[in-house]
Image: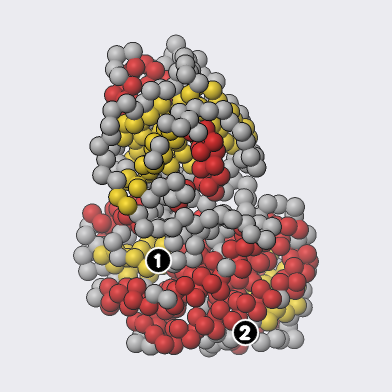
Amino acid sequence: MCGIYGSIERANHAPNIVFAGLKDIEYRGYDSWGVAYFNGEGFNFVKDIGFLPQSLELPYSNIALGHTRWATNGGVSINNAHPHTDCTRSLALAHNGVVENANILKDTLVSHRFISQTDTEIIAHLIEEERARLPFSEAVKTVFNKLEGLNAILTSDGKEVVAIKNGSSLIVGKTDSGFLVSSDTNSLLPHTNQLYFLEDREPVVIGNNPINLSFISIPWKYQSADLGNFSHYMLKEIYQVPESLDNLLQVPKQIKDASEIIQDTRNVFLIGCGSSNYANLAGEYLFSKFGRRLTFCCVASEFSSKQPYLTTDDLVISVSQSGETIDLLEQVRLSKTRETKQLAIQNSYGSALYREVLNKVMLNAGAEKAVLATKSFASMLGVYILLANQLGGNYPQGEQIILKSIEASQKVLDNKIEIQQIAKELSKSEHIFTLGRSLSYPIALETALKIKEGSYIHAEGFQGGELKHGVLALIEKDMPVLVFTSSNEEKQNILTNASEVKARDAKVFGIGEEKSILFNKYFSILPTGADSIIPKAVFSQLLSYYLALEKGLNPDKPRHLAKSVTVK
Ligand code: F1P
């Protein structure tokens, strides 16, 4: 989850380049940060807890390594912030991952002085040991081979910089005045489009000797993280939903190609995590409704039980905004060993998933910086609407639904004041329940997730039909229940469910195409032809945003979370 950024630079601007790079990858972890720069003899370290400062002037140096942290081993403290060093302070090391055998390795280092509780510092001291008998780069390789788990490290002794990884990405960029190393492709693009993607366990050594890597020229453009006139990335990104949906319509070929792959397969499994998993659940309903195709939605971290039964006739559709989610990548890699067909739906050019899976549908939603998935989620729904309709032989119908969803989403944005008022009313609640049926059920689940992530209020989503099977026992007087109504065959059923909670004195908020006297409050959504799931999702995103503001929280960076989930 952490972010690594390093610079080796003849013009001696390495520390400031690294600081700017860290700004770009802060979404990967933001509980603390640090920059180490070489001072000619050893390393100086600048570290702090919390977010990166707006600006920071650092001295000139030819080597700097930086890190943004999402704590796994050891709490959030300056001592635990990376980069770490050894007893001699002659090396600096930044790390992403978890060393699973850290305790065993630490037992071999009894004479060393540790100042942190991290597994990372153990790596630094192990390298110190190996350096007594090996050149620096060899020592790093030897130590890396002792580490169990998925790890990426960037380390330097002031003469050489060594990058090595297994699992999450590390990318080297070649600039006019040196080299950069980062966990994220986009953060390199302001400086260079000459990139090299490290293979697992392949050490890259940048030092005095010329480096022999086959850099490839990447055509992608830097996706700027400019806030524009918006107060937060989350709000900006919700406002970009209509544009992101429109981008999908510009590349019909990728939908047609993907639907041919689906047509040719026996079982189709949709795997993802978090919001991507809820988009997949909506995909499952959409494939049934418009594509007349049975598919199976599975949370990626629970997919391993199905792996033994996958065959070459099956298809795994892996869905991810970041393309770096380890729970997903692991299952993709495993299913590839069974030669199962692959298709990825994702947003990030150059990500691990992008490189892992040849057949792709790109969301083309642009950079998404806020931790909460917004425009990417809307675009995932958009892809499924188009794919399912293409599969059902009616792409133009899918296109119409997207066009109507753009209009309806814009209408939700225009009515944001109403959502702000609902957020005000809900902000004092301890619990919020959300209900939906059929296509709107995944939206109820996604809404509950958004509320949790944005406001830390306990929220749960349920199928309307499950109420009377237990959930109803939780309903108390004035408990807020958000009911996502249905415009399809479930229309009457979901209203019956609304009346069931109303009869127990719940406060019912109706969100959908038609008003009902059952609702204490109603938010109107324009019809789109697919139960208005995209504009309903936009409603939820704005609700979560305003709830965060009501609670005095930063909607872009919820506590304990990160946008790129690279540890298990
Ligand atoms: C999955 C995910 C997001 C969530 C948060 C953490 O990411 O769970 O849905 O909002 O950002 O990660 P991805 O695989 O779609 O990148």
Give residue 435's mark: none
- Write the residue at 62% across / 63% down: 236
Examine the image and state in which quarter residue 356 appears.
bottom left
Circle 2 Cα neighbour tier, 10 Å, few/some/many (<14 / 14–19 / ≥20): some
Question: Would you say residue 303 is visible in this rendering?
Answer: no
Question: Would you say residue 542 is visible in this rendering?
Answer: yes
> Where is residue 143 drawn, in percent x and y?
33, 26
Nearer to me, 462 or 348: 348
Examine the image and state in which quarter residue 297 appears.
bottom left
- Write the residue at 55% across / 84% down: 404
Secondary structure state at the residue bearing disc 1: strand
Q: Indicate left or right for 321 with 197 as reference.
A: right
> Where is residue 439 drawn, in percent x and y?
51, 78
Secondary structure state at the residue bearing disc 2: loop
- Looking at the rendered structure, the kind of residue marked 2 is Leu
Circle 1 Cα neighbour tier, 10 Å, few/some/many (<14 / 14–19 / ≥20): many
Q: So how many labels did they put on this image?
A: 2
Q: Nearer the viewer, mark 1 or mark 2?
A: 1
| Residue beneath disc 1 | 362
Do callouts 1 and 2 mark residues in contact (Cβ within 8 Å)?
no
- Looking at the rendered structure, the kind of residue marked 1 is Met
Nearer to me, 183 or 301: 183
- Write the residue at 32% across / 26% down: 208
Q: Is mark 2 within 8 Å of ligand 1?
A: no
> Where is residue 402 drawn, in percent x and y?
50, 80
Nearer to me, 358 or 451: 358
* Gap between marks 1 and 2 measured at Cα: 27 Å
| Residue beneath disc 2 | 526
Query: Which label's residue is closer to the chain start, 1 or 2?
Result: 1
